[in-house]
Amino acid sequence: MLLSNWGLQPLSDDTRLALLQILEDRYVQKATVVASQLPVDKWHAYINQPTLADGICDRLSANEIRIELRGQSLRKKIIWLVILFLYICTNIFNMDKTGTLSSGMPGTLSSGMPGTLSPKSPLMLLG
């Protein structure tokens, strides 16, 4: 699942609850990618409901792989971000030529050691 432009619009009560339920269903089973210009330390305030914010942030940060982009805007260099994403999909998640992601085997693709990437790891692209 890809959450693109996370933090640009206020979340309604229904949206917050639905997001928590979706993340709960995916928790430690499927990858979630979050792309946002909103710093992670502001996500709790953005969600604006303490109990749901705790649950959402906990599920997004569990086993996370965080890539924080700094410096000039990458809008001019977006092709490099696309190349990075395709590289990750191809080499980590075994993307085939049709663009389908498959693990090739049940369970995680990595050793499960901390710091390794598996299909269950949230990937956050921040910039």
Image (cartoon, rainbow, N blue to C red):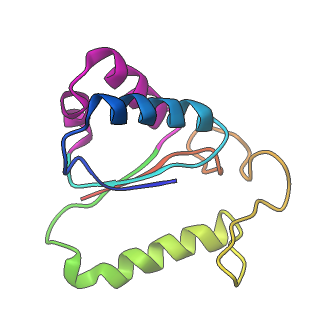
The residue sitting at the top extreme is: 51
The residue sitting at the left extreme is: 72
Residue 99 within the magenta-colored segment of the rendering: no
The image quarter in which residue 79 lies: bottom left
Residue 55 within the magenta-colored segment of the rendering: yes
Q: Is residue 87 left or right of residue 11?
A: right
Most foreground residue, 126 or 49: 49
Task: Name the residue: 55% across, 30% down.
Answer: 24
Which region of the structure is painted magenta?
Answer: 39-64
Most foreground residue, 106 or 80: 106
Task: Name the residue: 42% across, 22% down.
Answer: 55
Q: Is residue 60 visible?
A: yes
Relative to 105, say whether 95 is above or below. below
The residue sitting at the front extreme is: 14
Residue 115, horizontal then vertical, whole percent: 55, 43
Q: Is residue 61 visible?
A: no
Residue 102, horizontal then vertical, whole percent: 75, 64
The image quarter in which residue 28 lies: top right
